């Protein structure tokens, strides 16, 4: 496999040799995918390159404070075709959504990502599974291209790092992450403002669905697994998709729990499953076995079938994870 330094050089060449990029990130965008896309946009802008940023889904309101966030378009609202594409924070091409109408024949893709489950779908791949966030890789690319960092670019990179490390609380918070974050503060980034907007402020809609979800919370396997669910009927039309984000953490954070799970029925017999673990169980590998992906401590997949079926299958898979026996449980 090409080493990371060579990947950075190849990615820099891809950007230098092309223009008019389509920047696309994964469906149901989170803080890192939005921040990384916008950081990349600022990088391209500094190089005098043109670009269009798209996502299949609506950007959560709490990230609209980020510079250039107003330029992110829904895929269906863009009619142009692009020959050069940069995918950001995407483990596989399907996570782009319905992107085909925007892709010209023979288009080339630069794939920038930090997920261990990435399938190397790009013509050029810039992948670092040990990175805490894709924003960390965009920082490295900025350095490779010798692009000066300003407050706008710094704010985007910092927000990606901050959100994907859970406010620098998760185990992916490396010394490198903290060094980058400290440097970015020198450019005028406001850590208190970003923390308040992205982690501390919640909507009434989130409280409404959280109350329902917590009323359905189950703790099983001697307290090692906690899960809850929301059915389609539990979700009023006024609830935004991002207002259910974070519910899985209430399951994971219970004392003694190793694996937290949140099941959300988005359509009849279509269930989005979010997985979190504390120290041992590799939920990324479990999600991959269901056709999903992610990281060892945070992952997800979509299941087509009844809720009780996926609960039974997932319980089986968790108990057969390599780390489960180290929790003192029988496999």
Image (cartoon, helix red, strand yellow):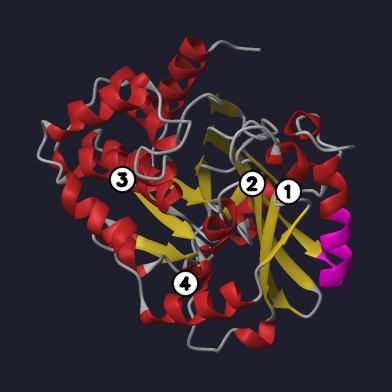
Q: Nearer the viewer, residue 263 or 142?
A: 263
Of mark 2 and mark 3, the one earlier in the sequence is 3
Asked if the residue at tag 1 contacts the one at tag 3, i.e. Cβ–Cβ closer than 8 Å, the answer is no
Answer whether labels 2 and 1 touch (C-beta < 8 Å).
yes
Decide: few, some or many residues near mark 2? Use Cα within 10 Å; few <14, some 14-19, many ≥20: many
Q: CA distance from mark 3 to mark 4?
A: 19 Å
Q: Is residue 163 left or right of residue 97?
A: left
Q: Which residue is mark 4?
A: 243
Q: Is residue 311 magenta?
A: yes
Residue 61 percent location from the top left of the image: 34, 69
Q: Nearer the viewer, mark 1 or mark 4?
A: 4
Disc nearer the start of the sequence (3/1):
3
> Per the image, is 167 magenta?
no
Task: Tell me the magenta residue range.
Answer: 304-313
Name which residue lies at 52% across and 79% down. 211
10 Å crowding of disc 4: few (<14), some (14-19), many (20+): some
Q: Which residue is mark 3?
A: 159
Lower position in the chain sequence, tag 2 or tag 1: 1
Q: Which residue is mark 2?
A: 299
């Amino acid at each position: 496999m090409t080493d990371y330094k060579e990947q950075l050089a190849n990615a820099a060449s891809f950007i230098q040799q092309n223009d008019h990029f389509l920047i696309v990130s994964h469906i149901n965008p989170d803080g890192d995918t939005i921040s990384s896309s916008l950081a990349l946009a600022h990088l391209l802008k500094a190089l005098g390159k043109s670009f269009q940023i798209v996502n299949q889904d609506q950007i959560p309101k709490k990230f609209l404070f980020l510079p250039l966030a107003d330029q992110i378009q829904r895929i269906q609202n863009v009619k142009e075709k692009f020959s050069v594409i940069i995918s950001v924070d995407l483990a596989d091409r399907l996570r782009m959504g319905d992107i085909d109408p925007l892709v010209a024949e023979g288009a080339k893709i630069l794939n920038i990502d930090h997920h261990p489950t990435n399938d190397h779908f790009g013509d050029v791949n810039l992948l670092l599974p040990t990175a805490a966030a894709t924003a960390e890789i965009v920082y490295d690319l900025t350095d490779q291209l010798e692009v000066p960092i300003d407050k706008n670019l710094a704010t985007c990179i910092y927000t990606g790092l901050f959100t994907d490390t859970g406010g620098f609380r998760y185990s992916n918070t490396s010394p490198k992450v903290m060094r980058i974050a400290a440097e970015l503060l020198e450019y005028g980034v406001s850590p208190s403002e970003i923390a308040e907007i992205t982690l501390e402020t919640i909507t009434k809609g989130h409280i409404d669905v959280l109350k329902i979800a917590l009323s359905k919370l189950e703790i099983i396997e001697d307290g090692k697994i906690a899960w809850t669910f929301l059915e389609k009927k539990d979700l009023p039309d006024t609830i935004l998709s991002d207002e259910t984000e974070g519910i899985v953490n209430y399951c994971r954070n219970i004392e003694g729990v190793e694996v937290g799970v949140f099941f959300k029925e988005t359509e009849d017999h279509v269930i989005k499953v979010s997985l979190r673990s504390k120290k041992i169980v590799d939920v990324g590998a479990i999600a991959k076995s269901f056709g999903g992906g992610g990281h060892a401590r945070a992952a997800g997949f979509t299941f087509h079938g009844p809720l009780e079926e996926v609960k039974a299958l997932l319980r089986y898979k968790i108990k057969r994870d390599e780390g489960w026996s180290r929790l003192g449980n029988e496999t």
